[in-house]
Image: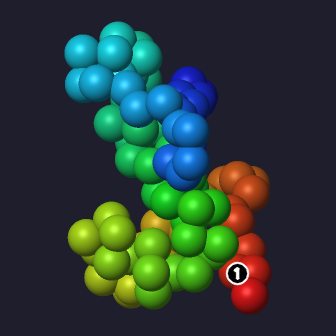
Amino acid sequence: MTTVHVAASGPGAQFLSPNQIVPLLIGATVDEIERELVLQTLARCDGNRTRASRVLGLSVRTLRNKIRIYAASGIDVPAYHD
């Protein structure tokens, strides 16, 4: 699995332009990129699946199904934090 980490949002964060991001993604499968996007979005939403689904443009049910598949594969999924 290829892990792609991009700059975090927030005060003082550096943002990457598309021509900087695409080379980081080359060599990764679409499934790997999607999984990384879902997991990082969940982490930034403190594990809140409703909020993460809105950010990702997915239904909560679709996100929940993806999370179930990731967890069954042994991938750590960010837990909800108040």
What residue do we see at 24% from left, 15% from top?
19
Of residues 80 and 13, the one drawn nearer to the viewer in this rendering:
13
What residue do we see at 33% from left, 65% from top?
56
Of residues 58 and 20, the one drawn nearer to the viewer in this rendering:
20
Q: Residue 66, relative to residue 13: is it above or below?
A: below
- Which residue position holds label 1? 80
What residue do we see at 28% from left, 24% from top?
17
- Label 1 residue SS: loop
Q: Position of residue 23 (x, y in %)?
A: 35, 11
- Residue 4: tell me if it is visible: yes
Count the marks. 1
**Disc 1 marks which amino acid?**
Tyr
Q: Position of residue 46 (x, y in %)?
A: 65, 72
Q: Quadrant of residue 47?
A: bottom right
**Looking at the rendering, in which quadrant would you find the N terminus?**
top right
Q: Is residue 32 left or right of residue 80?
A: left
**Looking at the rendering, in which quadrant would you find the C terminus?**
bottom right
What residue do we see at 54% from left, 51% from top?
10
Q: Residue 81, relative to residue 6: is it above or below?
A: below
Q: Quadrant of residue 2?
A: top right
